[in-house]
Amino acid sequence: PTDSPIGIDPLRVVAKELKFLTGNIQQLLGSGHPLLDRVAKYYTKSEGKYVRPMLVLLMSQATALTPRYSSGSTPSSPSHRASSIDEPLSPPIILSDANPSQNPLTSQDSTTTVASEDILPSQRRLAEITELIHTASLLHDDVLDTSVTRRSAPSANIAFGNKMAVLAGDFLLGRASVALARLRDPEVVELLATVIANLVEGEFMQLKNTSATTDAKHPTYSEDTLSYYLQKTYLKSASLISKSCRAAALLGHSAPEVVDAAYAYGRNLGLAFQLVDDMLDYTISGVELGKPAGADLELGLATAPLLFAWKEDARLGELVGRRFGGEGDVQMARDMVLRSTGLEQTRALAQSYVDKAIAAISGFPDSDAKAGLVEMCTKVMDRRK
Ligand code: FPP
Ligand code: MG
Ligand code: MG
């Protein structure tokens, strides 16, 4: 354990661990069928950001220094387990460290044992599993979105066709499931299986821009509009990040309050991550992004920047109703968003989630890994791709 340096490079903290990640993932994806082997490994050969594995590794290391689970403490709440559209967007647990002697995450009472900051083999495997699930979702997503590029190269659906891209995604999910089962931890299996269901639920929610209760053809902005979007965002993006942070803490036998803090960190960071993603779609060129920019409006999607603009200008409702399919709709919506405070408000909302993520782990003892988790928050806010 060291003190907590400001602005530590999170990549450096877990660089040693990450070095083996791609090789291990490729091993998990080996198939005797040469073409399936190639398609399945296709996205593992491009430069991913490895956000999810990095978070799992950092969380594993940061929680290794916190109190362990022991028979004396209460088991973690099963509230995260509900498999359907769960997770009301309630405020996260904020752990005040005003009085360190009473901080549940650092107190060393008789129920806790001293831990090392080593990452366990099971946590390393979890990092690989999160990347497999993420990559499977990208293979399927590029088919659904009829994408042409991903990470500055032809997307898998273009390189191999839709059928092979879908099957390769299924193959990744299969191999991820095998690796998950081998962890021999039913609660972790349940969490990650729920993630896969959540990804599909989020994608289904996105097929319809607004909740089923509003008039699809003539929607008006209401209180529900943003919460529907945030729920979709949780399922599509934050579920994997939050539940894998939770699983990392569980595999390390962390105490229940630590497991909950890991989850709260991931949930809030995941929401911020997607809000920034939705902002970049309006502000960054396709060349810099490595995938087409402005794609959301073209796909008929009303994301946070547009929703905030719609709140200010009801005329956007008509365009939302026809999913920007009318002549000149995309350009008009784009201009209206850029003239509104939508991008500013999206950024502010992302910042508020990032602040909550940092607050969630503020009670963890200081370490390079904790500083790395904090720095991930800054990186999410500053990223340009
Ligand atoms: C990227 O979103 C896509 C996702 C985060 C998840 C997509 C989920 C599915 C396709 C459901 C099937 C899931 C599995 C596990 C097989 P995006 O299109 O907004 O981002 P992009 O610009 O990177 O394409
Ligand atoms: Mg897409
Ligand atoms: Mg998509």
Image: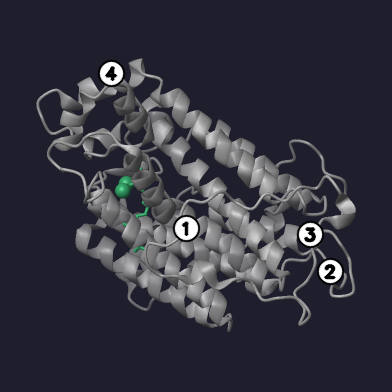
Which residue carries the number 4 mark? 335
Question: Can residue 264 be seen from the camera position used here?
Answer: yes
Q: For mark 4, does the 10 Å Cα neighbourhood hold few (<14), some (14 to 19), or many (20 or more) residues?
A: few
Query: Does the residue at mark 3 contact the one at mark 2 (Cβ under 8 Å)?
Result: no
* Relative image position of residue 43 (x, y in whole percent): 41, 55
Query: Is disc 1 in contact with disc 4, using a CB cutoff of under 8 Å?
Result: no
Q: CA separation, marks 3 and 2?
A: 13 Å
- Kindly state the secondary structure of the residue where label 4 is placed: helix
Label 2 CA crowd tier, 10 Å (few <14, some 14–19, many 20+): some
CB under 8 Å between discs 3 and 1: no
Tell me if the residue at label 3 has its CB under 8 Å from ligand 1: no
Horizontal side of 293 relative to 146 (left or right) equals right
3 vs 2, front mark: 3
Which percent across, then down, holds residue 95? Answer: 72, 51
Amino acid type shown at disc 3 = Leu
Mark 3 vs mark 1: in front: 3
Residue where numbered disc 2 is placed: 115
Mark 3 vs mark 1, CA separation in Å: 24 Å
Residue in view at x 27 percent, y 56 percent: 204
Label 1 sits on residue = 239
Identify the mark at residue 105; answer none if there is no mark: 3
Cα distance, mark 2 to mark 4?
54 Å
The colour scheme used here is one colour
Q: Where's the N terminus, which quadrant? A: bottom right
Q: Earlier in the sequence, mark 2 or mark 1?
A: 2
Residue 5 found in image quarter? top right
Give the foreground label among 2 and 1.
1
Q: Position of residue 364 (x, y in %)?
A: 77, 54
Helix, strand or loop under label 3: loop
